[in-house]
Amino acid sequence: MTLITLEWFYALAGAIMLGVALRIARDAGHPRRAGSAAFWALLGLVFVTGKWIPAAWAGLAVVILAVLAATGQVVRSGERERPKPEREAEAARLGNRLFWPALLVPAVTVLGSLTLGRIAIGRVHLVDPKQVTLIALGCGAVAAMALALRFTRAPVSAPMAEGSRLLQTLGWSLVLPQLLAALGLVFAQSGVGEVVAGLVAQVLPTQFPFVAVAAYCLGMALFTICLGNAFAAFAVITGGIGLPLIVQRHGGDPAIMAAIGMLSGYCGTLLTPLAANFNLVPALLLDLPDRNAVIKAQLPVALVLLAANVLLMWLLVYRF
Amino acid sequence: MIKLVGIAIVAVGFALRLNPLLVVLAAGFATGLAAHLSVTEILELFGKGFVDSRFVAMTIVLMVPLIGLLERHGLQERAAAVIREARAATAGRVILLYCAIRQVLISVGVNIGGHPQAVRPLVAPMAEAAARAQHGELPERTTHAIRAHAAAAENVGNFFGEDIFIAVGAVLLMKGFFTAQKMDVSVWRMALWGIPTALAAFATFAWRCRRLDRRIAREVAEDGRKDQA
């Protein structure tokens, strides 16, 4: 038994989303009041109730969210951030104290990850050891918020107003990573990976050790680009190309293959808009007009590293 | 072969810039139907996948009210003021330093940082302030390039440091994969062989940061000439 579970923090996040919906519903100047409020309300409900409702209901909610987003119903309000001169004055008034809450979050996260999982009375655990990092992060966010409210002397409504504005900037991009995780599940259930791996093994001259390495590394990167997730690609490509060709046929070392193979997948992550939480969300968070700006900045790094990975694996995997 | 229809839909949908949520949903339904799953089964898979991965959005949603509140009280401005006092700071060096800290810490299991927590309120404003302290006012495209590189530093440091630590997602996932294949592969060896790529990643990103500093100087000079003409 556990006292504090991750569901508490899912409920808190859901409550914040419901708060966004409420603010939109009360904002007469919002360009898409009904549709945007419905999107955030439904999303908040799924976050709060997700563990208890039937999976098909959650799936239906996902379909409705996607339709609202695709029909242009989910847009940001006209709220603006505080004028720069006022922020400059506040920065001068508060000084380096402003950094403390921002540093308290990682501090609580690290300390909490190390300790919270071990606290137990008999068989009653304080938190689930498997979820301890995320729970510690949640605790850090709550503690930092209390500290920040205290020394800024801001009203309690201020963080909700600012959070609502920032979340509306992200809009539907916020849930794209979750839809992709779900797509990965559908692909796995349908056996897509086996088909891809079979094709590669048929088409390429994989009797050459170097070709096997190149096919594996590039396969990891390409499949990650298509799925948006290197972890999903790893099982498919390693099972289909890496193990049969590099390890079994050419006698390569599985540990070296796996390590460098996963990192080749990460080169794909740097390049794909499907890795929305790494590439699209930051572009929106940083007010970049080109939503692919982060991918473009990462392109040279990804290509150089992918070539380096092929070379490194070829040099190392058959030798150690 | 027909099961690959989902990958084709994703590729075409993104190329045509259709709404990604709808593209992903369409790809899922097409693939599921091609593999003879029922509509209800596909809905269940989408629901389960969505609910099980709530943690991704949760971390962002719990952080933005705090970051928004601190920014309302001048966090970005304060970060910029601090960096202006450091004479040796350039945008590229600030960004590279963040990448180094991120990569080293996560390789020993300390996962701090993130786009909402660190890049938006601290790293990007510090890098921009360093460039302004050096060059004066910056063209808009230059500030955009600085911000994009700050976001890239977070990803590069995170991705290519993580695999060196044995107790995190990637290494455990690989271990789980091999266990399912009835193979005994050491987590220590997998972590060890992540190091060459980690070093290559840092070296490559250091090169990109030097390029960024030169690009900033060039773009400021170009705009200066345009103003005089």
Image (cartoon, rainbow, N blue to C red):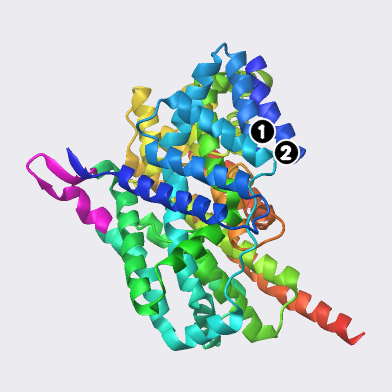
Q: What quarter of the picture does the N terminus of chain B occupy? A: top right
Residue A215 vs A44, above or below: the answer is: above
Whether residue A247 is visible: no
Q: Residue at the location (65% across, 82% down)? A: B132
Instruction: Residue A217 in the image: state x and y as whole percent.
Output: 58, 37
The residue sitting at the top extreme is: B36
Whether residue B79 is visible: yes
Which tag, 2 or 1, sits closer to the chain's start? Answer: 2
Residue on which disc 2 sits? B18
Magenta includes A284? no
Magenta includes A126? yes
Q: CA distance from mark 2 to mark 1?
A: 7 Å
Residue A85 as seen in the image, left or right of residue B218: left
What's the amino acid at mark 2?
A: Leu
Q: Residues within 10 Å of mark 1 (few under 14, many from 20)?
A: many
Q: Residue at the location (67% across, 32% down)? A: B10
What's the amino acid at mark 1?
A: Val
Q: Quadrant of residue B108?
A: bottom left
Q: Residue at the location (42% across, 56% down)? A: B62
Q: Quadrant of residue A97?
A: bottom left
Q: Which residues are magenta?
A: A112-128
Label 1: which secondary element: helix
Residue A111 as seen in the image, left or right of residue A211: left
Q: Give me the disc on residue B23.
A: 1
Instruction: Residue A74 in the image: state x and y as whole percent.
Output: 63, 47
A33 or B220: nearer the viewer: A33
Instruction: Residue A180 in the image: state x and y as whole percent.
Output: 55, 36
Q: What quarter of the picture does the C terminus of chain B occupy? A: bottom right
Residue A74 vs B119, above or below: the answer is: above
Instruction: Residue A68 in the image: state x and y as whole percent.
Output: 63, 39
